[in-house]
Image (tube, grey):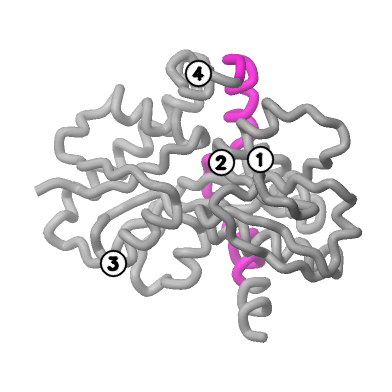
Amino acid sequence: MKLRIGKIPYANLFPIFYTLEKECDCSSYEFVEGVPSILNKMLRNGDLDVSPSSSIEYLKNPSIYRIIEGHSISSQGPIESILLFSKIPIEELNGGTIYVSSQSETSVALLDIILREFYGIQCRLHISINPEDSEGEAFLLIGDDALKYKARDKRQEVRVYDLGELWYKKTNLPFVFALWIARKKLHAKAELLDKFIKDLNRAKEVAIKNFSEAARYSPMRAFMTEGEIISYWNKIDYDLTDKHKKGLELFDKYLRELFCC
């Protein structure tokens, strides 16, 4: 019997998984790789036991999950990998179409909230397999796709808006993009889960002190320097404090207002 663990292959989690597999005995774990939307569904259906998961997944189904305390993928300012690219100023997008990725429901909902609540505008958010190839005025990229596009596209006429930065400027609170959550009914695997939480705690502690080592093995070296990779990781907030939870509560409030109408 193994603990089934979701593994998001994005750069933001690379130092955590790299360190976890390097420093800890993972023989009792089965890692299942997938983008957030796929892992969310697997966790919800019981095909996974624990996973880093979109914060919106937890907020929609709190009765199913327990939060693994002290861990998240958050930002207190720019996150650099949740980016809106626009040919025109964001204020002029009202009534237009923004092409978005289907990989993260949280990022799409955050964009909708930012547009409605912070700018007072409404746009059609159209899901696309390749948002950057659309002919619209703007598109949203997340994760490694956002990092790669920004790294290779230096055209000054394309405006770049960092959703983590826009949220923090208006709320002065962290934005929690992802949480580590586990299914509540894991009685037969309780000891395995306890072991994993201890391993995850150690992996985070070690990883944050050793970004330079992880950067040498990161797939991002194909399009970013090691210095750029380390700088990116240093902008990510891997903690989950009371302040983070206040940011999560505010996101939940906006979500309820958004979807109740």
Q: Amino acid at mark 2?
A: Gly
**Residue at the disc numbered 4:** 215
**Residue at the disc numbered 3:** 45
Q: How far across and how far down the image is residue 87, in percent?
A: 84, 46
33 to the left or right of 238: left
The residue sitting at 87% across, 37% down in the picture is: 157
Element marked by disc 2: helix
Name the one closer to the observer, 53 or 246: 53
Tell us which disc is closer to us: 1 or 3: 3
**Residue at the disc numbered 1:** 79
The residue sitting at 37% across, 54% down in the picture is: 39
Closer to the N terminus: mark 2 or mark 3? 3
The quarter in which the C terminus is drawn is bottom right
- How dense is the environment of label 2, judged by Cα within 10 Å: few (below 14), some, or many (20 and up)? many
Q: Is residue 171 above or below residue 198?
A: below
Q: Amino acid at mark 4?
A: Ala
